[in-house]
Image (spheres, grey):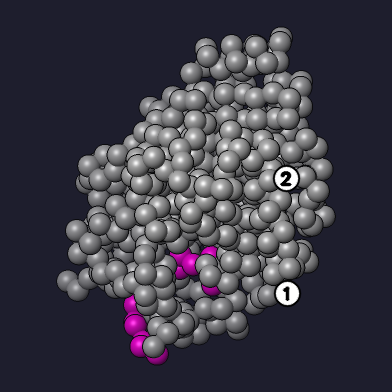
Amino acid sequence: MEKKKVVIVGAGPGGLTAGMILQHRGFDVTIYEKAGVVGGRNAAIKLGQYTFDTGPTFLMMKFILDEMFAETGRNSEDYLKFHKLDPMYRLKFTDKQVLVTDDHEKMEKEIEKIFPGEGKGLASYLKNEEKRMKYLFPCLQKPYSSIFDMMKNPLLKALPHLDLGKSVFNALGKYFKPEKLRFVFTFQSKYLGMSAWECPAAFAMIAYIEHKWGIYHVIGGLNKISDAMAKVFAEEGGKLKLNTPVKRIINSGKKATGVELEDDTIVNADEVIVNADFSYAATSLMDKKQVKKYSPANLAKRKYSCSIFMLYLGVKKKYDMPHHNVFFAEKYRENVEDIFTRLKLSDQISFYVQNASIIDPTLAPEGKSGIYILVPVASLKGNIDWKKEKDAFRKRVLEEVVKRTEMKDLMENIEEERVYTPETWRDDLNVYYGATFNLGHNLTQMLYLRPRNKFECLDNCYLTGGGTHPGSGLPTIYESGRIASNMICKKHSVKYKEPSSLNDKF
């Protein structure tokens, strides 16, 4: 029997996941990637002898990644070396700092030391958010092709645990009174590119995920995950075409039939999976007559995540500071509202610093460091002129980093540097509005109301990545790849197992 042919547009985490699973299950899969490396926003950046992750810098829910390798009969640890982090990260305010650990006894003592009388709230938080997680995560592993899918289990059972109408910040008020302590468990809404005051309360479970299962560094950087997936894909016989941009998705009426490459080559396929940034794909790769639902005018009305300003610095010195560090602006809520509501450059900045060289010697030459600095900023739905602001903002960021971290002599030790502004994300990585975390995760853009894994506007077309269901973040992007794969298998009567229950993980 002739194998069904699947074309995947983009070798990001979602496309690679779908590629290796479908190739293993007997499909003939080709992935087309415009860049010279795999990974997309999970690719490596090489600056001289330094290596950086473009985007994600730590892995949550490692067991989800393990499952993706298991789908192909493999063990992730045969391909990757994982390092569990303790403390997970340091959170630094202008007057105090918190070392966050997934050791619950140590964490309770840390809270009690810094916020006297509040330590007891941790047990209550963990108990209630575990219940929320048990009900909600299975909903993120299911497709929502029909409005009737919203009426099925497990979603119906999960509804009472959504805390509809509340934000993540509100939800944390049940456990902790001090505002700064709530920040310790709500800043994770930034992983979705959202404000803790707007992010739906259901996502209060993100911090629980960290405290339950911990977080991991991958030696060599998280980009090694994409490399490992590409290796599995090749071992299975999949075809990966780098430096091969796709010009458009070809369709006959509503049916996707393949792709046209930048060099005008036509590639026919039985199924097409799109792993490009969703809004970019809808406006630049798809037949506008078929995707009127996602026209530029319609997309402009939708909510988007923030963007990020990035500094990747090769530094000729090692610094004695934790692997992950988050620094909050003194007026944190004002800073957040500038980013998400006023869409302007804030008078203050909050920022994140990764100092991975402290535990990973593969990222920089001996005695040196790769320093990764991330600053949340407004998406390009605002009117910030980054060509004008870039240099001055870089200077502000570096001055703040020098002032608030152990790296007092950072500026004189920089020997390699790359800067990403929101315009870089838009122009070089095709990220719509430079919104690095894709479409917002408000309730009107989730589940059935988010672009669906079996794309509603084109038949034979499937979506993976952070812009589709279940959403942003590596574990959910991997799930999007598995969901698309399972739907294609179901259509062609190829046997597969439904995702395993989380019950054995608690």
Horizontal side of 49 relative to 161 (left or right) equals left
Outermost residue to the front: 412
Outermost residue to the bottom: 264
Q: Which x, y percent locates residue 60?
A: 46, 38
Check disc 1 and give the amino acid type. Ala
Q: Residue at x 42, y 40 (%)?
A: 357
Q: Which residue is mark 2?
A: 349
- Find numbered disc 1 in the image and state the secondary structure of the residue it sits on: helix
Per the model, the C-alpha gap separating discs 2 and 1 is 32 Å
Horizontal side of 102 relative to 69 (left or right) equals right
Q: Which x, y percent locates residue 300?
A: 72, 68
Q: Residue at x 26, y 69 (%)?
A: 239
- Which residues fall within the magenta stretch? 264-281
Q: Residue at x 42, y 43 (%)?
A: 368
Q: Residue at x 70, y 20 (%)?
A: 175
Check disc 2 and give the amino acid type. Ile
The circle on residue 297 is 1
Question: Which is more toward the observer, 177 or 256?
Answer: 177
Image height of 334 relative to 306, above or below = above
Question: How many numbered discs sit on the rendered protein?
Answer: 2
